[in-house]
Image (cartoon, helix red, strand yellow):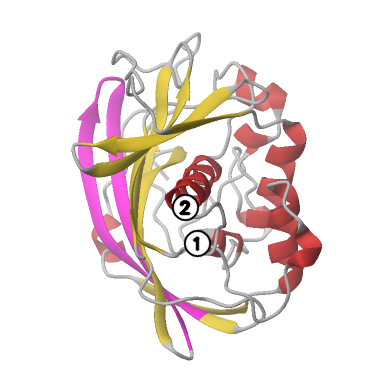
């Protein structure tokens, strides 16, 4: 637990470096169909043995902490695999590589390692960045290699609005090869929280998110935004299907998006790199990403 509301508790953090966790799970058809329905796809068309679409591994290997181990915001509070240096935890970004393919219905193993812990001073106070490396393997070997970047923040000071940030908005690129409009409603957020077993209250508890965290509305999940960009990027890079397997996907969260507000998913080639973005018309880019695909 932090020593105060604003300063991280650095005691014992070194013990988390290199910590490893091994988990096994069957990549169930039912859960994959649940995500397909959430994304408004034909869920019934999926079957055991099909390739799991890129990024869909996020609905597996989900948290299993008991309710008594959760903090006021719904995240695990007591030190388990991850440290808890500050009270607020957010998904800041990461990268995905796909050296193989996962298949629906098979058993897979995920090995997670805490790779780094860094203290920084942000515009609003101290921050702690934790990088976790995941490798998911099946009988053929490694299929997904992931680096996940988490950021821990102090509590939002009374009267301050969370998520506004003090840096100016980043405008979306003026030229896009394609663009799609999307809005995540309450049902979308509920279903994605359920599929990922994410009990963070900013995604479903309007009273908590507005009165305690200081956001203007329910927050769209960072992984959901990344998944929407990855999905759209793959469709527009190929023939419209989601079967194309990317080589590398990097993404970074810049600012939040909120329930029921329309935003643009866009993409295009910028200086020879395929760039993707989720952008609000007034607040600019919320999530930015790059994508490399194989033929």
Compared with 111, 166 (above or below) is above
Assess whether residue 81 is covered by the magenta stretch: no
> Nearest the camera: 29 or 129?
29
Magenta segment boundaries in residue numbering: 109-138
- Residue 193 vs residue 263: left or right? right
Q: Which residue is mark 2?
A: 234
- Residue 114 vs residue 108: left or right? left
Q: Position of residue 46 (x, y in %)?
A: 72, 68
Q: Position of residue 21 (x, y in %)?
A: 43, 74
Q: Residues within 10 Å of mark 2 (few under 14, many from 20)?
A: many
Assess whether residue 121 is covered by the magenta stretch: yes
- Confirm or deny contact between disc 2 and disc 1 (CB under 8 A): yes
Mark 2 residue element:
helix
Q: Position of residue 147 (x, y in %)?
A: 33, 59
> Nearest the camera: 98 or 207?
98
| Residue 144 in sight from this viewpoint | yes
Distance of label 2 from label 1 (alpha carbons): 9 Å
Secondary structure predominantly adopted by residues drawn in magenta: strand
Residue placed furthest toward the front: 239
In which image quadrant can residue 153 be found? top left
The residue sitting at 25% across, 52% down in the picture is 117
Which numbered circle lies on residue 54? 1
Compared with 256, 246 (above or below) is below
């Amino acid at each position: 637990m932090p020593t105060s509301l604003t300063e991280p508790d650095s005691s014992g953090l070194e013990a988390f470096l290199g910590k490893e966790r091994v988990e096994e799970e069957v990549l169930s058809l039912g859960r994959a169909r649940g995500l397909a329905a959430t994304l408004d796809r034909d869920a019934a068309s999926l079957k055991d043995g099909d390739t799991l679409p890129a990024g869909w591994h996020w609905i597996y290997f989900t948290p299993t902490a008991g309710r008594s181990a959760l903090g006021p915001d719904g995240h695990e509070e007591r030190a388990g695999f991850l440290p808890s240096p500050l009270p607020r935890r957010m998904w800041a970004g990461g990268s995905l590589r796909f050296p193989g393919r996962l298949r629906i219905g098979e058993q897979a193993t995920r090995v997670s390692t805490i790779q780094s812990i860094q203290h920084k001073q942000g515009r609003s106070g101290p921050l702690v960045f934790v990088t976790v490396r995941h490798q998911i393997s099946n009988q053929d070997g490694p299929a997904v290699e992931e680096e996940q970047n988490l950021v821990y923040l102090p509590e939002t000071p009374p009267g301050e609005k969370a998520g506004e940030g003090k840096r100016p908005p980043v405008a979306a690129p003026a030229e896009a090869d394609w663009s799609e409009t999307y809005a995540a409603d309450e049902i979308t957020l509920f279903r994605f929280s359920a599929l990922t077993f994410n009990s963070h209250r900013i995604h479903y508890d309007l009273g908590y998110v507005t009165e305690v965290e200081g956001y203007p509305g329910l927050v769209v999940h960072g992984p959901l935004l990344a998944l929407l960009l990855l999905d759209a990027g793959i469709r527009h890079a190929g023939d419209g299907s989601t079967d194309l397997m990317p080589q590398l996907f990097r993404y970074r969260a810049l600012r939040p998006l909120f329930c029921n507000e329309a935003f643009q998913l866009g993409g295009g080639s910028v200086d020879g790199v395929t760039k993707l973005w989720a952008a609000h018309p007034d607040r600019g880019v919320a999530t930015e990403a790059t994508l490399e695909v194989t033929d």
